[in-house]
Amino acid sequence: MADGLDAQFVQSLYDNPAVKLETELLAANLRRSEATLNYDRFLTPTAVARAERYLQQYRPALEEAQRRHGVPPQVIVAIIMVETSLGEHTGKCPTFNLLSTMAVAEDPQVRALVLDSLTPEDRKLQSDEVIAQKLERRIARGYTELKALLDYARQSQSDPLAVRGSSEGAIGIPQFLPSNIGRYGRDGDGDGVVDLFKHEDAIASIACFLELNQWRQAHGARAKKRVILSYNRSSYYANAVYDLAHLLKHANNGNASPPGRAEASSTQTN
């Protein structure tokens, strides 16, 4: 309210019985490690065939995005495949509750509830220092992302309590954090609203993100992977997206094996 949000609106949200702390969800987020994810499943013949069908289905939107932003359709489709399995899995976490919990997790009682949700096995996989650093990063962005979510809900005329996303607070087909929507979100279907749960808007928004992160200036595999890393700071992720885009580009000319990964970035952030 002190930052200018309508007091009645804010009060009505937090008076809703559906609003609660999600300390276990936040703890689950701290457990997550990119190194344990199976990115190879996005490079199977079945996955590539699904991605090809998606590319054909949304070719007009993909070609328009390429015309405007210079990003090949195959790269956009690869990101959508790896992020949400072509929009089929956009997340089930109540985003408003999760971001609210992040925003108040500096409170000692809330922090204790989050850490108490971690099992002894969780603590064996990561040191207390690593866990604490992860939690501090979530706390640092929780309030900013919460305000951005409310801005997004207002402009898209949606109920913020109905939004579901990932355990990071990312939402929609492209899995944008709410604070990225104002900067990179684009109206791909021309209805005057940026709705990241619509494929055309997701396609346009991903293309805009990559363009503004220097896709046009990136030449060669190493440089292009660095741009992809700006979307998700995991070398495993960047490799999977780049390799799937390569498979899609060459699927119809007989060169359907992924490129070597020697040029993968060594950058990895969990």
Image (spheres, rainbow, N blue to C red):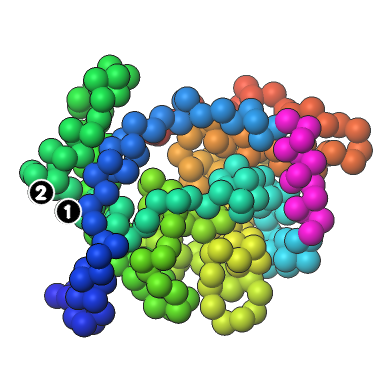
Q: Quadrant of the C terminus?
A: top left
Q: Is residue 55 magenta?
A: yes
Q: Is residue 248 visible?
A: no
| Three-letter code for the amino acid on which mark 1 is drawn | Val
| Disc 1 element | helix
Rendered image: mark on residue 86: none
Q: For the residue marked with disc 2, what is the amino acid?
A: Asp
Residue 104's mark? 1
Q: Residue furthest left?
A: 108
The residue at 52%/52% (across/down) is 90
User: Which x, y percent locates residue 146?
Assistant: 30, 62
Q: Check contact, mark 1 vs mark 2: CB within 8 A.
A: yes
Residue 151 counted in the magenta span: no
Query: At 24% across and 20% down in the image, what residue appears?
Result: 120
Is residue 111 toward the left or the right of residue 99 in the image? left
Callout 2 crowding tier (Cα within 10 Å): few <14, some 14–19, many ≥20 = few
Which quadrant of the figure contains the N terminus?
A: bottom left
Q: Which mark is residue 107?
A: 2
Q: Residue at x 66, y 66 (%)?
A: 200
- In three-dimensional space, the C-alpha distance between marks 1 and 2, rounded to whole angstroms, equals 6 Å
Decide if residue 92 is in sight here: yes
Of all residues, the one furthest to the front in this rendering is 17
**Relative height, residue 109 to residue 142 (above, below):** above
How many numbered discs sit on the rendered protein?
A: 2
Location of residue 248 with respect to 191 vertically, above or below: above
Question: Which of the 4 image quarters holds residue 33?
Answer: top left
- The extreme top residue here reads 124
Query: Could you say which is closer to the camera, residue 240 or residue 31?
Result: 31
Give residue 186's position: percent from left, percent from top. 56, 70
Residue extent of the magenta highlight: 44-57
Q: Main secondary structure of the magenta part?
A: helix
